[in-house]
Image (spheres, helix red, strand yellow):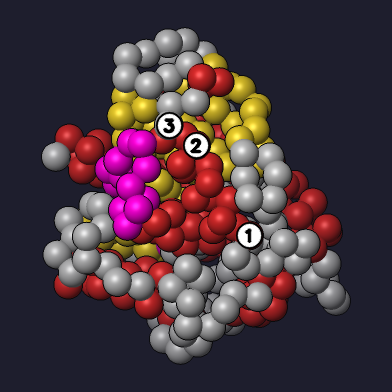
Amino acid sequence: MADDSIYVRPDVAGFLALVNSVPQPEALIPEEQRAGYIMMKQMTEADPRPMAVIKDLTCPGPAGDIPVRFYDVRESRDPSPVILFFHGGGYVIGDLDTHNSLCTELSHVLDLPVLAVDYRLAPEAPFPAAPDDCEAAARWLAASPAELGRTVTGLVTIGGSAGGNLATVTARALCTKPAAAPMLLQVLLYPATDESQDGSMDTFAEGHFLTKGAMDWFYDLYKPESGNPRAFPLLAEAAGLCPAIVATPGLDPLQDQGRRMAAKLVAAGVDTLYLHFPGLTHDFSTTRKALPSAQADMEKIMGAMKLMLGR
């Protein structure tokens, strides 16, 4: 339950009171959780920005075509970086629609194209299906595929939670074995990075939106291989990775995992910006209608992205 000694923002307090008042289901069923996640985003997420281009396409993957969605605030543009977006949802829920508004926000504010990846989900496709699909999509994008009508000069990977995990795992794959365009930046929003069960995972186990029980359920279905750095990137060598932004909210079970990832990147000499947002919950990037303060913090993160790309 929530601890009264922990700082909670006023808009977050109202949001948590509503979330915690809803009876929990007796059993977690993937299909029901996916439908519920879509409904929640319709109520809590900001409206999408107008885009000049939105295209649903596919790219080749290791187990067949991978659905992707391409966004651009401009009808056409000169060669530029492209943002590669991986949604969150514990590798079990989430899709192109649940994070549609955030992708339009990124393209609008950063004035860059965005490609969102609908990687395979567990339990139908457990680990390593998700990182396999994300790496395949990244290499396809880096080659400036004709379907996009864009010349790609570099990649920026970004995602939250499971998507933050996939953003750094994919960045490492492309830094280790370069693709047709270079990795420029990885943006890790409240990322899942290790197997820890203590610290913030214990402090915020219940009552703060994401719960430890939900994380356990996600991993039971995803079946990540213990000790594998493609599942738990904190175990991977960090030297030689591209610059990074790591953002953590103060009420998140994954807070310590993100902090440790930022510390490891810094220790390895990676140009890293760590941003911490007290009083905010997990998944704040896609609850911007319910949490006005989260919109302001996402604007800070996007401002940081401009700064890092400018360097």
What's the residue at 77%, 62% (across, down)? 124
Report how far apart the C-alphas of labels 1 and 3 lie in the structure. Answer: 22 Å
Mark number, residue 223: none
Tell me residue 214's x, y (percent). Answer: 66, 73
- The range drawn in magenta is 174-190
139 w.r.t. 280: above or below: above
Tell me residue 189's x, y (percent). Answer: 41, 56
Q: Secondary structure at mark 2?
A: helix
120 w.r.t. 295: above or below: below
Tell whether label 3 touches label 2 (CB within 8 Å): yes
Q: Secondary structure at mark 3?
A: loop
Looking at the image, which is closer to me, 302 or 260?
260
What's the residue at 72%, 61% (across, down)? 125
> Mark 2: which amino acid?
Trp
**Would residue 128 be seen by someone viewing this image from the given angle?**
yes
Residue 214 among those drawn in magenta: no
Number of dots carrying numbers = 3
Query: Which quadrant of the rendered structure holds the C terminus?
Result: top left
Looking at the image, which is closer to me, 304 or 58?
58
Which residue matches tag 2?
A: 140
Q: Nearer the viewer, mark 1 or mark 3?
A: 3
Report how far apart the C-alphas of labels 2 and 3 lie in the structure. Answer: 5 Å
Query: Which quadrant of the rendered structure holds the N terminus?
Result: bottom right
| Few, some or many residues within 10 Å of mark 1 (<14, 14–19, 20+) | some
Mark number, residue 143: 3
Compared across the picture, whether 273 is left or right of 168 comes to left
Tell me residue 205's x, y (percent). Answer: 56, 81
Mark number, residue 129: 1
